[in-house]
Image (spheres, helix red, strand yellow):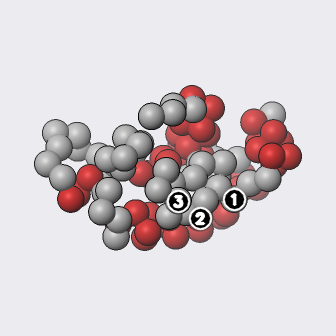
Amino acid sequence: MNIVFGQILEGWRNKLLPPEHLKEEIEKVSAERISICNNCEFHSKNYNSLRPDAFCVDCGCTLSTKTKCLSCSCPKEKWMKILTEEEEKEIKDV
């Protein structure tokens, strides 16, 4: 498993304190991704787990934050990142 801490932080930031100019885009993208994840065989609801959150059993990420990370992709390629390298740098500089 490849852990990218910057992406984890981006997901949590976008969940808790999203940049004002990205709020609508983050919510739109997250809703589309959650819909895909809810129908995925790797969704935690399909497994016995002690974790109380909805998460991906492949990567281990909490879905409510992973889906809000615009520079993240699904490890099973069910959805891809939507930012260019330049946009990623711009967001990280905010």
Residue 45 x/y as whole percent? 22, 57
Q: In which quarter of the image is the N terminus?
A: top left
Above or below: residue 7 compared with residue 31? above
Q: At label 3, which amino acid type do we have?
A: Glu
Q: 10 Å neighbourhood of mark 1: few (<14), some, or many (≥20)?
A: some
Q: How far apart are marks 2 and 1 (CA)?
A: 9 Å
Q: In this view, does 88 lie to the left or right of 68?
A: right
Of the 4 image quadrants, the one containing the C terminus is top right
Residue ID for mark 3 = 77
Q: Name the residue under label 2.
A: 29
How far separated are the C-alphas under marks 2 and 3?
Answer: 15 Å
Return the disc, 2 or 1, that comes first in the chain's sequence: 2
Give the image location of residue 57, x and y in percent: 32, 47
* Residue found at x 37% / y 41%: 60
Query: Mark 1 or mark 3, which has the lower sequence index?
Result: 3
Q: Which amino acid does label 1 sit on?
A: Ile
Residue 2, relative to residue 40: is it above or below?
A: above
Cβ atoms at labels 2 and 1 below 8 Å apart? yes
